[in-house]
Image (cartoon, rainbow, N blue to C red):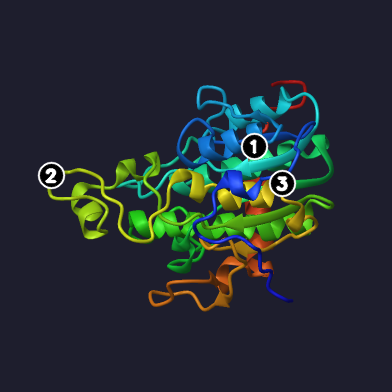
């Protein structure tokens, strides 16, 4: 399968990606659209004419399957694209959602799975799903035998990396299980957003993202939110990506090379993140979790 190359670069902005594209009449749902990358993407899409729906956390809590079900049950009208942008990172201690799933996997993956599959009746022909992953997917795949750290020691970064590998597998799974809906994942690159709220100052300084006084700094390679949102809107709305599905795009806004995962690779998408067999197993696991949380017929 030939890798896709786009005319954009790591410094392209969301507005530049959408230049000359008229999205009037398109309806796009974006999670985490109130700040950071999500807000930058939402603003660019609105400027291009799209109707953007960006529920706040009080309207849609991805860690709460009841909240997700209420959102999908109450949805009216068509959906041309979903951008799964919201997420959490490096929660310091092991925490679980109400259904027992480890919190990062529950929020970053399962909540979006429930949202995307719950809206299946509303997708228009050619609808797209965009899943925000991370270069962290190179560091750890999904442990399908112990995904919630019930037997292995909990590590914040392993849990985050696992959740972002799961997000890429969701793109593969959607391509295999949701018919005409296309789905692709991306790594936006390094950007200062609220996603870093759980990271301590020592780690931020070690990353070169904070000075000794606690002020944020921007090392070489860091992006603005408008640059980080470029791949989100590219995959959601650019005609260049029409019909493309099951792919992963890196921080340069290009399709990434498939590489072995592990501590060494600094670029690409890990083999475990695009493995169809793993995607199918994870899909079944997610379906079972969502189905077991449904109320009895006639309730809810």
Few, some or many residues within 10 Å of mark 2 (<14, 14–19, 20+): few
- Give the number of marks: 3
Residue 264, image x, y percentages: 39, 77
Q: Distance between the Cα atoms at labels 3 and 1? A: 8 Å
User: 37 or 73, which lies in front?
Assistant: 37
Residue 237, numbered circle = 3
Give the residue displayed 67% in from the left and 32% down from the top. 294
Q: Distance between the Cα atoms at labels 2 and 1? A: 37 Å
Give the residue displayed 61% in from the left and 31% down from the top. 68
Residue 69, numbered circle = none
Q: Is residue 41 visible?
A: yes
Quarter in which the N terminus is drawn: bottom right
Quarter in which the C terminus is drawn: top right
Q: Secondary structure at mark 1?
A: helix
The residue that disc 1 covers is: 45
User: 215 or 134, which lies in front?
Assistant: 215
- Whether label 3 touches label 1, CB < 8 Å: yes
Compared to residue 111, the image places residue 228 above or below, namely below
The residue that disc 2 covers is: 213
Residue 171, quarter of the rendered image: bottom right
Q: Is residue 149 visible?
A: no
**In the image, farthest residue toward the front:** 20
Q: Secondary structure at mark 3?
A: helix
Few, some or many residues within 10 Å of mark 3 (<14, 14–19, 20+): many
Of the residues under marks 3 and 1, which one precedes in the sequence?
A: 1
Of the residues under marks 2 and 3, which one precedes in the sequence?
A: 2
């Amino acid at each position: 399968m030939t890798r896709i190359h786009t005319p954009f670069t790591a410094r392209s902005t969301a507005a530049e990606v959408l230049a000359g594209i008229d999205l009037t009449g398109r309806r796009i749902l974006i999670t985490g659209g109130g700040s950071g990358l999500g807000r930058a993407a939402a603003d660019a899409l609105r400027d291009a004419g799209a109707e953007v729906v960006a529920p706040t956390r009080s309207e849609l809590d991805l860690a709460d399957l009841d909240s997700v079900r209420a959102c999908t049950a109450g949805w009216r009208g068509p959906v041309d694209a979903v951008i799964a942008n919201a997420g959490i990172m490096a929660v310091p201690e092991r925490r679980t959602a109400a259904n027992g799933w480890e919190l990062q996997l529950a929020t970053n993956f399962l909540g979006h799975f429930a949202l995307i599959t719950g809206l299946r009746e509303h997708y228009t022909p050619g609808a797209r799903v965009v899943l925000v992953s991370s270069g962290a997917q190179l560091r750890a795949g999904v442990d399908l035998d112990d995904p919630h750290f019930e037997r292995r020691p909990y590590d914040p970064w392993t849990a985050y990396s696992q959740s972002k590998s799961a997000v890429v597998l969701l793109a593969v799974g959607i391509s295999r299980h949701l018919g005409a809906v296309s789905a692709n994942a991306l790594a936006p690159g390094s950007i200062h957003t609220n996603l870093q709220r759980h990271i301590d100052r020592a780690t931020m300084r070690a990353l070169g993202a904070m000075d000794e006084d606690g002020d944020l700094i921007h090392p070489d390679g860091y992006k603005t939110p408008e640059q980080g949102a470029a791949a989100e809107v590219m995959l959601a709305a650019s005609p260049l990506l029409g019909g493309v599905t099951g792919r992963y795009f890196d921080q340069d806004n290009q399709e990434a090379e498939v590489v072995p995962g592990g501590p060494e690779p600094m670029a690409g998408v890990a083999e475990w993140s695009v493995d169809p067999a793993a995607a199918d197993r994870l899909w079944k696991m997610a379906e079972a979790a969502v189905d077991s949380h449904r109320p009895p017929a006639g309730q809810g």
